[in-house]
Amino acid sequence: MASAFEYAPAPESRSVVDIAPSYGLFIDGEFVEAAEGKVFKTVSPSTEEVLSEIAQAGEADVDRAVGAARRAFAKWSALPGSERAKYLFRIARIIQERSRELAVLETLDNGKPIKETRDADLPLVAAHFFYYAGWADKLEHAGFGPAPKPLGVAGQVIPWNFPLLMLAWKIAPALATGNTVVLKPAETTPLSALFFADVCRQAGLPRGVVNILPGYGDTGAALVAHPDVNKVAFTGSTAVGKEIARTVAGTRKKLTLELGGKGANIVFDDAPIDQAVEGIVNGIFFNQGQVCCAGSRLLVQESIQDELLDSLKRRLSTLRLGDPLDKNTDIGAINSAEQLARITSLVDKGAAEGAEPWSPECELPSSGYWFAPTLFTNVTQAHTIARDEIFGPVLSVLTFRTPDEAVAKANNTQYGLSAGIWTEKGSRILAVAGKLRAGVVWSNTFNKFDPTSPFGGYKESGFGREGGRHGLEAYLDV
Amino acid sequence: MSEKTEKTEQRLSVFKTYKLYVGGKFPRSESGRVYEVTDAKGKWLANAPQSSRKDARDAVVAARKAFGGWSGATAYNRGQVLYRVAEMLEGRRAQFVHEVADAEGLSKSKAAEQVDATIDRWVWYAGWTDKIAQVVGGGNPVAGPYFNLSSPEPTGVVAVLAPQESSFLGLVSVLAPVIATGNTAVVVASEKSPLPALSLAEVLATSDVPGGVVNVLSGRTAEIATPLASHQDVNAIDLAGADEILAKELEIAAADNLKRVLRPQPVDDWAATPGIDRLTAFLETKTVWHPTGSLGASGSSY
């Protein structure tokens, strides 16, 4: 919908961040080459420009990093909690100071809009370190017994959708509780994790407490299987989560998994439509829909379907897709060619199975990986697009007549991570929230996060919670 | 010796046919199989039902059916129902002392200690039903105009492999926390000593515990546990009664639908006061957000 009020380009400068032409692995406080000498390239999803060449960790490197973390563990876990707290507070502050650099870096490497890295990712990253810093010297008051102990070396594998935020979710509670970590960032987004190594250097963090091993799935598998890893934390797909659960079976490794989702966003007939539309947009188009807790299934009460869809389509027509570094951009690039292919194939399947796709008029840039915001109507619960996680800017619209039907449809999924409820009626919010099998329920809002609040799934969305007091348990021997 | 006394001594006792407990009913195993249960000295005690995979599946169906009502009951109500079980156990104390003494080869006094500890354990968990949410839930101080609450909820149907050695205290120590929090259970009794578990079912059946909330199976642990671990409608499994090799196999099978797994924990003394680990192991945490429209509740100028 072209209008007289088009925004002029407002690009953030990429010169605020220096990206080295190549990076090593970060082991024992130093950047080192991979033992096998392998490297891979990381590209900007919006331009396909090669940003840097990254060392690719193999089994020998995993062994080296776990060894470094093990050596560092004795001292780090023996530090008074108040000292560990200060390191974490330092890290939180340095992240705040350097958040502009980090936001630009994240946008370049991930493809998400600068608006989101600047206003959502980075503030939350700092907040998580700040929050868990404060726990480090108060663990005996956390409700896990009078003298809770760390587990040892934590092997952590994180995804590409929120590279630095997922790092913060994993590293902050691990360090606060006295564990040391070996973290594998995703192969398409290793830069901010490597940059974090520099934050650790500035904070004076002891060597070996944090180790970063960029690599592919095999690197993560080697880390998870390493006999000297005491705790495994994974965020990613349900299929890989199941594989990890099998790998650690029969060992004493503690495991937490934060996996996929197919969140239901339920809109009742008395909902404030404009607010609901904003919530729906935020629920599925935030971060190009590449969010495990995305509200990817819209359940709308039949009587307001037409009104809601009209408003929603009108709103989608105002979304701006394009250069992620432009401060006015709402929708950035899809993270990788592989992910774009997956989204495309599922959307094709949706149309082939009889659902009706709709997208606003939208010009896609000629280079990079892009997918226009899409919504499907005429969707049934049997459709693939209503069951499989698409992890892209694709919304499936279903309808219901009664609250019971809404609950039944919302729960009709293998997943159980998130859900949304839109209604003005308080008792209905509480009744429906109580019946939903999901770890996070947003009423009259969506996609809100906070370090004080436990986050995690029911059913095949995984187990364990991140955030809040609950998030400490994953890293304590309880 | 009078004729009367002689008669008493020669009176033939009535044996009990032990049965499974599924969905509030006492069926025989659908397989028609039984196995011999002996006391610690090898003396025959009874023929216990040897459950099959079909019995396990029936038990899961019963447990699933009971979940909505049991998890939806008020915590106060669940607490009272659990306490009622303790009352009934107390009344049958002598029976259980006898059964535990036979099952575990204990003296009467040692067995009595076990049974007393078991009844007290049950009372302890009865008191937890309406407190666990306050201990592990809470309101979170969100940095924004929102209010959110984290509350624990039962995870669903839990398969419980009861400990092999402690036939009654161990059994109750793993079963009571599962149902106290609103889950429903499929219990696999100790393979060697299943009789106290099967008798406990009779107590449960007469204690206001709704049918299907607890289902008790006896038989070969490995045979019954395998379909339970891979069952797509079981939400969690407690591997207390599995040996190391079986536990690993079951844990791998449980990964298929990402069951919550409680691995076998070394327990030196079942009589020691437990922590809340067994309560929290089968709970989910749900965080519900809502806008407040303002930044804090204490903004009043009063």
Image (cartoon, coloured by chain):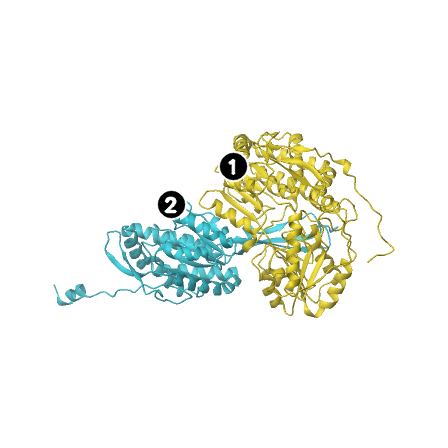
Give the amino acid at mark 2: Asp
Q: Position of residue B35 (x, y in %)?
A: 29, 59
Left or right: where A196 falls relative to A150: right
| Residue at the far right in the pictured view | A4
Q: Which residue is mark 1?
A: A152
Give the amino acid at mark 1: Gly
Left or right: where B199 falls relative to A260: left
Q: Which mark is residue B269?
A: 2
Question: Between A342 and B288, which is closer to the camera in this rendering?
Answer: A342
Q: Residues within 10 Å of mark 1 (few under 14, many from 20)?
A: many
Q: Position of residue A312 (x, y in %)?
A: 74, 61
Chain painted yellow: A
Left or right: where A26 falls relative to B77: right
| A99 versus B146 height, above or below | above
| Secondary element at tag 2 | loop
Q: Chain of mark 1?
A: A
Answer yes or no: is residue B177 visible: yes
Q: Position of residue A218 (x, y in %)?
A: 55, 41
Q: Chain of mark 2?
A: B
Answer yes or no: is residue B297 visible: no
| Secondary element at tag 1 | loop
Image label count:
2
